[in-house]
Image (cartoon, rainbow, N blue to C red):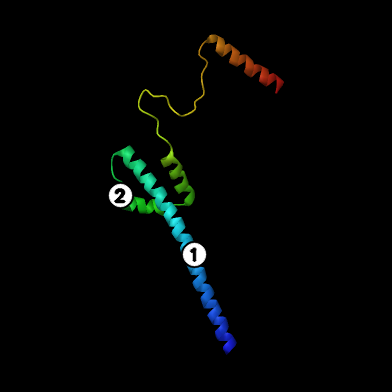
Amino acid sequence: MALELAVANVLEKLAVYIESVQAEKNAGLREQRDKVIEAVRQKLSTVTGEDIPKDVLDKLGETDPKVLSMFDKLASEKEDGELGEPSQRKTASAPLDKNEAVDVAGEKLVSFCVG
């Protein structure tokens, strides 16, 4: 009987410990999600000019972590500058004149033949 009580006490303490660890883990995840949701809310509010309803933010908080990370990436992208300023995005450069176009075509032909 005493052994059964001792085992029951150990199992109860183990359950309390596991619950506390899980609660800490969930609190950290919840905090991280809240940061992402706030960043997305700010970005969408800036873009649309409207405040995002709480029910939409709640649904966003329930989404898959992969989708949430995609939204986070979208929200954390730096915006381009004012009109007339150069963009920070890398784009493919087109040949500026006929000679450059001929050079690029020649390089492609050589790399095709050699490779």
Q: Residue 23: x percent and y percent? A: 46, 64
Q: Which numbered mark, 1 or 2, is in the foreground of this view?
A: 1
The image quarter in which residue 51 lies:
top left
Helix or strand or loop: what does disc 1 sit on?
helix
Helix or strand or loop: what does disc 2 sit on?
loop
68 lies left or right of 109: left
Q: Which of these two is toward me, 19 or 107? A: 19
Q: Which of these two is toward me, 87 or 59? A: 87
Q: Residues within 10 Å of mark 1 (few under 14, many from 20)?
A: few
Compared to 6, does 75 lie above or below? above
User: For mark 2, what is the residue?
Assistant: 53
Q: Which of these two is toward me, 21 or 44? A: 21
Q: Residues within 10 Å of mark 2 (few under 14, many from 20)?
A: few
| Quadrant (top left/top right/bottom left/bottom right) for the N terminus | bottom right
Q: Amino acid at mark 2?
A: Pro
| Quadrant (top left/top right/bottom left/bottom right) for the C terminus | top right
Q: Residue at x 34, y 43 (%)?
A: 42
Q: Residue at x 51, y 18 (%)?
A: 94
Q: Residue 113: x percent and y percent? A: 70, 19
User: For mark 1, what is the residue?
Assistant: 22
